[in-house]
Amino acid sequence: MHALALALLATGVSLLLGPVLGAVTWNATPFNPAAVPLAVRTPYLSVWLPQGTGTALNDQWAAFWNGDVAAWTGYVKVDGQTYTWMGAANLDNTTKATQKSLEFTSTQSIFTLTAGPIDLTATFLSPVEPSDLVNQSLPFSYLGVSVKSNDGNSHSVQVYTDITGEWITGVTTWTANWKTTTGKVLTHQLQLSTQALYEEVRDHIQYGSGYYSTLNTKGTTWQTGQDTVVREQFIGNGSLANTADNYFRPISYSWPVFGFSHDLGTVTSAATEPVVFVVGHVRDPAIQYVTKNNGRQERSILFWTKFKTVSSAISTFTNDYSNALARANAFDARVKADASKISSDYADVVALSVRQALGSIEITVSKKSGEYNKDDVLTFMKEISSDGNVNTVDVIFPAWPVFLYTNPALGKQLLAPLFEYQATGQYPNRWAVHDMGSSYPKAIGHNDGQDEAMQVEESGNMLIMTLSLAQKANDTTLIKKYYNLLDQWTQYLIEDSLIPALQLSTDDFAGRLANQTNLAIKGIVGIKAMSKIADIVGDHAKAKNYSDIATSYAQQWQILALSSDKTHLTLAYGNDSSWGLAYNLYADKLLNTSVFPQSVFDLRKYPSFQGLYLEFDTRLFTETKWYANHALAYGVPLDTRHTYTKSDWEIWTAGVVTSTSVRDVLVSSVRKYAADGKSSQPLGDWYETVDGSVKGFRARPVAGGHLALLVI
Ligand SMILES: *[C@@H]1O[C@H](CO)[C@@H](O)[C@H](O)[C@H]1NC(C)=O
Ligand SMILES: *[C@@H]1O[C@H](CO)[C@@H](O)[C@H](O)[C@H]1NC(C)=O
Ligand SMILES: *[C@@H]1O[C@H](CO)[C@@H](O)[C@H](O)[C@H]1NC(C)=O
Ligand SMILES: *[C@@H]1O[C@H](CO)[C@@H](O)[C@H](O)[C@H]1NC(C)=O
Ligand SMILES: *[C@@H]1O[C@H](CO)[C@@H](O)[C@H](O)[C@H]1NC(C)=O
Ligand SMILES: *[C@@H]1O[C@H](CO)[C@@H](O)[C@H](O)[C@H]1NC(C)=O
Ligand SMILES: *[C@@H]1O[C@H](CO)[C@@H](O)[C@H](O)[C@H]1NC(C)=O
Ligand SMILES: *[C@@H]1O[C@H](CO)[C@@H](O)[C@H](O)[C@H]1NC(C)=O
């Protein structure tokens, strides 16, 4: 197995397999994304099909978000002939099924393949359950497989799937052990023989267990053992031997696989009830969390409050498939209807973003006297792919719209650890901390104050998100509990946001810059947000003072930020040849704070938009069309320092502009990039506007920011 991957390893080439080239022969609805989400629910259950210009489900191995193979194999035997429908295990006596279609929605990726005289539908459902946080917290994902005859005749059909140990580690030379439990549900459980609490290697967690389960219905068999042995057993016989290979060994040594087979009997042109496979990864405790006096608390995933064992959680989850699918269909329909009010391109971008965003978080609970304390629910986010920080404030901030849209309680639970920690007084700086810990899942704070410094950025972000929560969820508990902390950050902003010092903004890859126009916007909106917060607690004198300061700053800012010919906003004060996306104006809209006058939102003040604007206003100079069509092929650059941009900030800016046609160009350029086949990685938010190639980052939670237009 993995001959291709091993050959690449041997030659020192990374496992980030390029797309398998070839003409796309299937219908893709709405398009073929760079990577198709297959099982995307947590930072450690994040498996995708690398897609590129067009890779069928059975062209290539599935992969963890970082590109490491996570082999998932599917065969179907039809009247004695075996077809491969998932993965790349094309053994003797197998034929490749032909992919006919791929469709993705907010929660599902649905493939249909023709295997001789039958059609097979594989539905990968990663539930998004915003109205039930216990359900949302379950670290499992579904694969439902249904078949039907396509030639009018009846056929004898058996379906097979397996996973490998690659699902539990990034180091395949490490030894695993496993066991299979039988009963109403069959479950393979596999784990590393040497467990390392809270430790990651290559972004995989190195403790806990992987699970692969299916209902033990009539005609269901299982087997563990070497890849070729188990797969050839199915190919030869259409069923497995119900036997375990208990020679525990390294994952890549005679590759042990964990297989199931279902005999579907005689299949007609009516689609069969789906056979359901459930894949997951569970660890406990899940998060290490800093408490006062630099204490450490162990936190568990919220589902433990409802289920005493993993097997009861798996059993309920597995049996709930048809209801979960109905809930998912309703959720998908709601998202699609809301997003389609903007445009169908927007609905496409949103559909690709939801699983990615929610797949970065884990909802946890602590224990009190041995019992789970349901009053203490905190949510943690991994800054996937950029640096693995925990609850990074300027990553929660761009992702914020997905939480406002799905369930603001998740936003509150993400902010709460940051407030709790800073209220202990252990963080020594007077501005807001950047994150809760350098490496997930260790939320151990930064008592040395040496977190990545983004002083104005994070202080403004905390104030803006906290007020937004109060407005959207009518929940003022954070405001009341942490009023002093919010005030402390505001006082910092009063000192340092009108004339921001040489600082990083969230776009740290662009480097530090003094007097950033866009960063000043954030600080000023932050001060205004605190004035509204002061009003909420009845501190009206403070509210008036801060409102006056914000208004005065906004007036001064306009003079500082406008180019000397008053035609556009600069990137940095005083540099007339600079400009950038002023995406922080979105916060002023989101909060309805109206700090900045409407004239600031006028497109004609942004040279960056003029090409686009003229493109859509044929009364104006058409020669600039060239610029719109070429230089800005995939949207507006982030600023004048580079030609790259950020997909989240394109969409935020789309929420700010006053022209519908420019809004649509911004949205459509992100859609064009997402569909352009130039990468085989989970959607990366940082990309080149010139040619639509990925600049960096992938699978990051900030895709949640693509929902920005749904919450204003
Ligand atoms: C392939 O099928 C032939 C004919 O049934 C059989 O002899 C052979 O052993 C099979 N090979 C494998 C690898 O299953
Ligand atoms: C949560 O999942 C359970 C099955 O575990 C299901 O019965 C219930 O309806 C779900 N709750 C909601 C609100 O969707
Ligand atoms: C093949 O499967 C049948 C049941 O379907 C079983 O009786 C037989 O022993 C199996 N043969 C092998 C070689 O496992
Ligand atoms: C908001 O919450 C307050 C206090 O909990 C309550 O009195 C008020 O009716 C709520 N408003 C809305 C619009 O739900
Ligand atoms: C920032 O802007 C202020 C106001 O225009 C100016 O006095 C100051 O020199 C600028 N700082 C830098 C580093 O350019
Ligand atoms: C307004 O707030 C600033 C910053 O906290 C403070 O220095 C100033 O004294 C306040 N002014 C009034 C009138 O309270
Ligand atoms: C926004 O604020 C203005 C006052 O500045 C108010 O008239 C308007 O109703 C607010 N809109 C919303 C949606 O709250
Ligand atoms: C002004 O901005 C441009 C474009 O970003 C940059 O190339 C130039 O170095 C900047 N000038 C100064 C003095 O910072």
Image: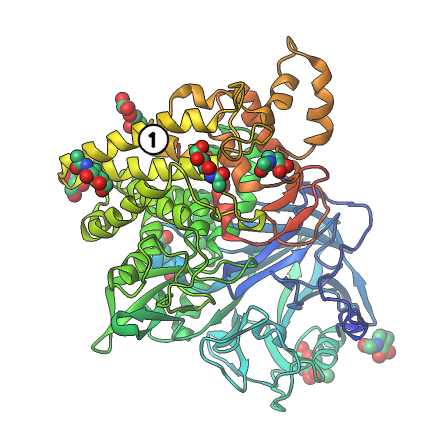
Name the residue nearer the viewer: 237 or 268.
237
- 175 versus 61 height, above or below: below
The secondary structure type at the circle numbered 1 is: helix
| Left or right placement of residue 405 versus residue 75 in this view | left
| Number of numbered callouts drawn | 1
Q: Quadrant of ligand 4?
A: top left
- 134 versus 54 height, above or below: below
| Left or right placement of residue 666 versus residue 591 in this view | right
Name the residue nearer the viewer: 527 or 465.
527
Whether residue 223 is visible, yes or no, is yes
Q: Position of residue 443 (x, y in %)?
A: 39, 67
Q: Is mark 1 within 8 Å of ligand 6?
A: no
Q: Residue at x 40, y 20 (%)?
A: 598
| Left or right placement of residue 520 versus residue 535 in this view | right
Q: How is the image coloured?
A: rainbow
Q: Position of residue 167 (x, y in %)?
A: 59, 71
Q: Position of residue 129 (x, y in %)?
A: 40, 52
Name the residue nearer the viewer: 157 or 634.
634
Q: Residue at x 25, y 52 (%)?
A: 485
Which part of the image, by quadrant, shows the N terminus? bottom right
- 701 versus 178 height, above or below: above
| Left or right placement of residue 603 versus residue 99 in this view | left
| Amino acid type of the residue tagged 1 in the rendering | Tyr
Q: Position of residue 674 (x, y in %)?
A: 64, 42
Mark 1, residues whose alpha carbon is within 10 Å: few (<14), some, or many (≥20)?
many
Q: Residue at x 31, y 54 (%)?
A: 430
Residue receiving disc 1: 553
The extreme bottom residue here reads: 247
Whether residue 708 is visible, yes or no, is no
